Amino acid sequence: MKNDSAQKSTFVPYVPASKSLPELTAVAIVLGIVLAVVFGAANAYLGLKIGMTVSASIPAAVISMALLRGVFRRQSILENNIVQTMTTAGEAVAAGAIFTIPALFLWNLTPSQSVLAFIVLTGGFLGVLMMVPLRRLLIVNEHHTLPYPEGTACAEVLISGETGGVSARLVFGGFIVGGIFKALGDGFLLFKTEIETNVGRFKNAVIGMDTYPALLGVGYIVGPSIAGQMIAGGLLAWLVFIPMISFFGMAGTTPILPASDLISKMDAWGVWGAYIRYIGAGAVATSGLITLARTLPMLGRSLRDTLQGIQRGGQNGGGIVDRTQHDISSKWLFGGIVVLLLIIAFAPFTNVGILGAIFIVIFGFLFVTVASRIVGVVGSSSSPVSGMTIATLLIVTFVFQMAGYTGQNGMVAALTVGAIICTALAVAGDISQDLKTGYLVGGTPWKQQLAMLIGVAVSGLVIGFILAVLHATYGMGSTALPAPKAVLMKVIVEGIMANNLPWDLIMIGAATSIALEFMGLQSLTIAVGIYLPIHVSTPIIVGGFVRWLIEAFTKDEGLKKSRVETGTLFASGLIAGESLLGVIIAIMIWLKVAMPEHVLFANGLVSLVLFLIVTLVLWWVSLRAKPLEGRS
């Protein structure tokens, strides 16, 4: 990277503003559309299967480089950036859809393709348009504060593909290691990729780990501080809250809502699923509000500058704007948001009305802001989109009930609002990562934003068909297609309408975040750690620890910077390799290719040893770096 300066204003991207390369070309658009549909379909199935999606930006960048250079003989890094931007739209739209919309199928409703497309398209377009005014605040002004791990990793992949040499070998070395690990673990099922162990006689106290190189790489990129905060939240949930609930509930003779089983019969996962996810949702929602309150002055200045630009007839008072700082016109931006909200309020496709449109504009902007910042810290894969959607559904459903929206019509209206906001959050988080990538490589923001809108449009038109086919084939909520996040959304809406939602758990999470703030801690990242299983935070802290070792025992500043950059390149490769193989595996499953059904080594030892080997390789690669002066 060319960013060595501490001054934001002097940052020079890989392709400077003074240079123009082919970018939003026909070839890039067509390739981006194809990959957006493929990645969207694969992630829809994967998300319905396991409750999470695979980040598409880095795999898309790798595929884009291979096709544009190897097949089409094109050399523009900015075209590659456009392709990966459009591809992430498919993944983001899939995430927003599968976390909420399947609940409609679970209610034995058969939504039409027009309704499904309407929900996803309005949410996706709002996600893009609401995030654009935040670009300067989050991407430019906080360039040295928010790491955006996946966006930075994607930029490293694109630039390494341009420069070749040592950088490319580092990225593709990590790519091979991460890809082989994923293929052997989740593809051929040679070993478990999730391991855990109980802590002595500490009832239901569990330490676990998803042994994924990608999470190791994320931890290295975000560093020990952020990784430490995440694991702190995980430890609080799995070594404090879960054992505490298990201890006080083991003598109970009746189930405690929202669980249907006795606590004494639950394992750690049962307690987490029945109680901790609600606590985590309350913590994330509260921390998000606190984070938003902190940024209100900056947001206010950003909004003021934007409005002043409109009054002056253009950006920067009509002056010349650098290519790398040119966003979509403010008039089109705010006009598009207003039109979308009017369509939502009065369109016959849904029954959310003016009240629903008001909720969408309030919670949409609120959580789009929070989501865009969260992905700058923990990445898109670890962003608690479903947690913020839960917080939205809690309030929206409650108000709808008070306003007389009851029964099935009320539940559908509340879920529709939640689905639109969920899609907006997922898309906003992904475009934030994409705009960070574009900022680093020198892309033109308005062209990326337009590319994302095209990707959302295409993905939104096909995702409903994909969901309908999957439901017809497997059945939403079945063993073959559990749809865990959508089941949770369904339970929340039904719970509020029936007045049996566990508000005490939500408030415990809220109080936890407030207590953390009074301790002087940044509660948001810790809240994310509470909400996610500790199995996600553990490999992230391992990666953060490796980076801490590198920084703590390297005294020469030039050598330290070189080692961190070298490790970041290799970590980026780990993320790219595992992500790409994860998508390939998802596509194979979606195409019903015969896959192994049983894990060969099920005790977890093989997985742990291999993960430690990858960790040592990351540490060794970082240590082998030479001082910056000695690098070619």
Image (cartoon, rainbow, N blue to C red):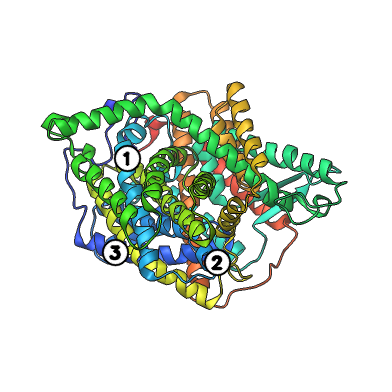
Quarter placement of the C terminus:
top left
Tell me if 477 is positioned left or right of 603 in this view: left
Which residue is at 16% across, 38% downward? Answer: 18
Q: Earlier in the sequence, mark 1 or mark 3?
A: 3
Quarter placement of the N terminus:
top left
**Image vertical order of residue 412 relative to residue 171, above or below:** below
Q: Amino acid at mark 3?
A: Leu
**Image vertical order of residue 191 relative to residue 595, above or below:** above
Residue identified by numbered label 1:
440
Does residue 372 appear in this view?
A: yes
Quarter assignment of residue 62: bottom left
Q: Report how far apart the C-alphas of labels 3 and 2 lie in the structure.
A: 37 Å
Q: Amino acid at mark 1?
A: Leu
**Image vertical order of residue 231 relative to residue 360, above or below:** above
Tell me if 348 is positioned left or right of 148 in this view: left
Tell me, yes or no, whether the two marked residues, 3 and 2, touch with CB atoms within 8 Å: no
The secondary structure type at the circle numbered 3 is helix
| Residue 258 screen position, x and y as percent | 70, 51
| Residue 22 screen position, x and y as percent | 19, 53
For the residue carrying disc 1, how many other residues have a C-alpha within 10 Å: few (<14), some (14-19), or many (20+)?
many
Q: Nearer the viewer, mark 1 or mark 2?
A: 2
Q: Amino acid at mark 2?
A: Trp
Which residue is at 74% across, 39% downward? Answer: 239
Which residue is at 40% across, 49% downward? Answer: 356
Q: Nearer the viewer, residue 217 or 422?
A: 422
Residue identified by numbered label 2:
107
The secondary structure type at the circle numbered 1 is helix
| Residue 619 screen position, x and y as percent | 57, 40
Q: Nearer the viewer, residue 355 or 523?
A: 355
From this viewpoint, which residue is outermost toward the front? 404
Q: Report how far apart the C-alphas of labels 1 and 2 lie in the structure.
A: 45 Å
Residue identified by numbered label 3:
31
